[in-house]
Image (cartoon, helix red, strand yellow):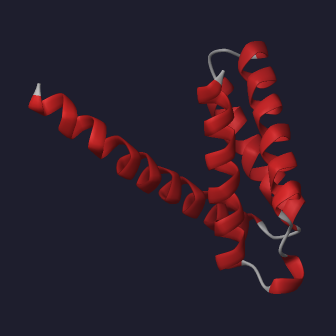
Amino acid sequence: MLGVVLAIALETMALWASQKIILPAEKERSLPSVLALVLVGLLASAGISLLIPVLGWLISALAWLWLVKVWFRVGWLRALVIALLAVIMLAAIALLVGLPFLAVERLR
């Protein structure tokens, strides 16, 4: 449960930072609004994956991109850039958080 809460928090922060970098100030959303987007996206992805197991991941990705597009009131390209930047930020955070654990494991 803690892992899910932490993942939601990290995804929210990455998406919030991504939109702060990409969007003009008048289109930016507040942190609680981005948290709501992440929760809606999580529920939509879970539902789609349960209903359509084979192609659920692809449809979920497109649904997530559509949610970002609608939520931030941007076009498809800008939504894609926001989403990709958030994924890159999440990967960097995961790497930074995981490196100490990897180093400790190597010492054993």
* 2 relative position to 30: left or right: left
Residue 71 vertical placement versus 41 (above, below): below
Q: Is residue 81 left or right of residue 51?
A: left
Toward the left, the furthest residue is: 107
Q: Judge by depth and name the residue closer to the eye, 103 or 40.
A: 103
Q: Judge from the rendering whether residue 107 lies leftward or rightward of residue 94; answer left or right.
A: left
Q: Position of residue 32 (x, y in %)?
A: 87, 55
Image coords of residue 78 (percent x, y): 70, 71
Q: In what quadrant of the picture does the C terminus appear?
A: top left
* Residue 77 visible within the image: no
Q: Quadrant of the N terminus?
A: top right
The quarter of the picture where residue 44 lies is top right
Left or right of residue 99, residue 88 in this image: right
From what the image shows, is residue 61 above or below residue 43? below
Residue 30: image quadrant is: bottom right
The residue located at (82%, 29%) in the rendering is: 43
Instruction: Count the labels in the image.
Output: 0
Picture layout, residue 101 above or below residue 49: below
Residue at point 59%, 28% (across, down) = 3
Query: In front: 24, or 101?
Result: 101
Instruction: Inspect this view and state whether residue 100 appears.
Output: yes
Q: Position of residue 14 (x, y in %)?
A: 62, 58
Residue drawn at (36%, 48%) of the image: 95
Q: Please tell me which residue is depicted at 75% across the width and 79% down the height of the picture.
A: 23
Residue 54 x %, y %:
62, 17
Location of residue 105 (image quadrant): top left
Q: Please determine whether, in this image, residue 82 is positioned above or below residue 61.
A: below
